[in-house]
Structure formats: structure tokens, C-alpha cells
Image (cartoon, helix red, strand yellow):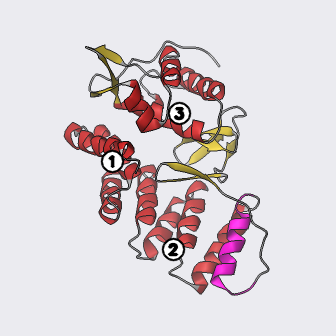
Amino acid sequence: MRPRRGLPANPPDDEMHAYDTKDLERLFGLPASAVRALSRAGHIHPVRRGNKLHYSFHDLVVLRTASALRAAKISSQKINKTLQELRSALPADSALNQLSLTALGNRIAIREGTTLRESESGQYALALEIVEEKGRLHVITRQDAAAPDTSAEEHYTKGLALEETDPPAARSAYEATLKADPNHLEARINLGRLLHLDGRLAEAEQVYRFGGQAEPFLVFNLAVLLEDLGREPEAIVAYREALALDPQFADAHFNLARLYERARDPKSSLRHLLAYRRMMDQGA
């Protein structure tokens, strides 16, 4: 991969926020040594003002990504290597927070729009082994496949068992679940997620909207989908709806802060970032 000149430290309109090492460990679970390593490698660019370091929102996105990958048992060396490769590959006017990283088992995948690409092999993959809910990563436990029948719950169990090995069959099982029970919330969320990961965004949107269920996870997933469709004003509305349903949904606050930052509304961005920080301090 051909090296290039480093990225600008932080965009000039990226507001800085003061944090000490205890703040960062409380917010992201990152020890001071990990934060220093990210800074030395040039992935974040804190600025010292007085007795505290100030971090941009770009820095916070990188810290949060590193935290999620560490929680998924990805080694610090692999995280650092992937971030370095990304910085080398991005255009000069781009930033790391324009992409996102996720865990595929013990591997790292780079999310580019609606697709996932393994960082080491460059091959495209589906992120089915790790599911993110409210900012926490959960491993899907594979279950033994159930014998086919017409029970909604048994179709749902079959879908869970097939996600890792046969995503199309898992989708069919979730569709059968919803045919038997249109109000099966978990099947609707999982079907929408699989369609989203497969790039079938319009179908995923129909799944999320058709149920008419006011549930925070469902609305949050819809908001993420709307972001990928480039419909950020609608995504903001959906994230706000998720917060109306669950005011303690910390990840919705974080994503709203990011979208408002991009929309050049620093007051709203800061308000949601502070709400996210309060929830992390309180262990929400």
C-alpha cells in the first residue's frame, strides 16, 4: 500500500472537548496506555490546554471504535495496524471517522457504505458473528437447527441457528416467523439487519417500517439504515424517536452528536455528546 502524507490533525470546525485519563477510561474503557498509543500512532490528535488534553469529536469516534474492538477481543496490535492502513489508503481530505470498523470473530472488517471488507484479506464479508446493541458487542451463539414446522418461535430459533452458516436460509426462517406472527419483534429486527448487511436497503426499510412497532432497537436500526441511504435528516428524526422511547439509549445520543456535528449544529452535537458522557459515567 503506497504511503502518503499524513491527514490534517483535526478539521478546523471540529469542536474540542476536555477529558482526562479517568474520563476516557470511564467513557470508553480504554486505559491511559492505549490512548497514548493511539496518539503516538497519529490516529488521534489531542491538544493540551492548561492541565487537560482536549479531544475533537473525530478523536472520540476513533477512541470509541478502538474500545468496541478491544471489547470484542481484537488485539491492540491488530487495531493499530488496521487504523494505519486506513490512514494510508484514504484520500487526503478524508478522515477515519468517515469509515467504521467492526469485529468479525477475531478479525476486523471495514465498513464502507453498506458493505464490509476484511481488513487483512480485502475480501467482502457479512458481520454476522458480532451484533452491536446500545454500543455493546454481543456474540451470536449458534444453536442446533430446529425441525421445520409452522410455529413462529421454532422458525425464529431456526433462523438464529442458520445466521452464521447460511444467511439466506436464516432470512427465509425469519420471514416464516413473521408470516406466522407479524408482531414477532426479534425476528423483524434480525431480518432487517440481515437484509441491511446484504445491501438490500429498500427491503430492510420495509421490514423495519411495516410492523408499526414503537420499539427503540427497531427504530435505532432504522436510523442506521437511513444514514446508509444518505437520508441523514430522516436518520436524525429516527434517532430522536428511539430516545423518546428509551431516554437511556446512549448509542442514539452518540450517533446524534455525530450527525449534528456533520450538519454544523455544534450546540445540538455537544448536548447529545454530554448526554452520552453522563450515561457512561452512570454506567448506563
Q: Residues within 10 Å of mark 1 (few under 14, many from 20)?
A: many
Mark 1 vs 3, N-terminal side: 3
Mark 3, residue position: 66
Q: Secondary structure at mark 2?
A: helix
Amino acid type at image mark 1: Leu
| Above or below, 57 relative to 153 | above
Name which quarter of the figure residue 22 lies in: top left
The residue located at (47%, 65%) in the rendering is 205
- 193 or 17, nearer to the observer: 17
Mark 1 vs 2, N-terminal side: 2
Amino acid type at image mark 3: Ala
The residue located at (79%, 69%) in the rendering is 144
Q: Please name the predominant secondary structure of the magenta segment in the image.
A: helix
Residues at marks 1 and 3 touching, judged by CB atoms closer than 8 Å: no
The residue located at (22%, 40%) in the rendering is 265
Amino acid type at image mark 2: Leu
Q: Residues within 10 Å of mark 3 (few under 14, many from 20)?
A: many
Mark 1, residue position: 256
Q: Read off the magenta span.
A: 149-164
Residues at marks 3 and 2 touching, judged by CB atoms closer than 8 Å: no
Question: Whole-Å distance between the Cαs marked 1 and 3?
Answer: 20 Å
Does the stretch in magenta take in 83? no
Q: Position of residue 159 (x, y in %)?
A: 68, 70
Q: Secondary structure at mark 1?
A: helix
Q: Quadrant of the N terminus?
A: top right
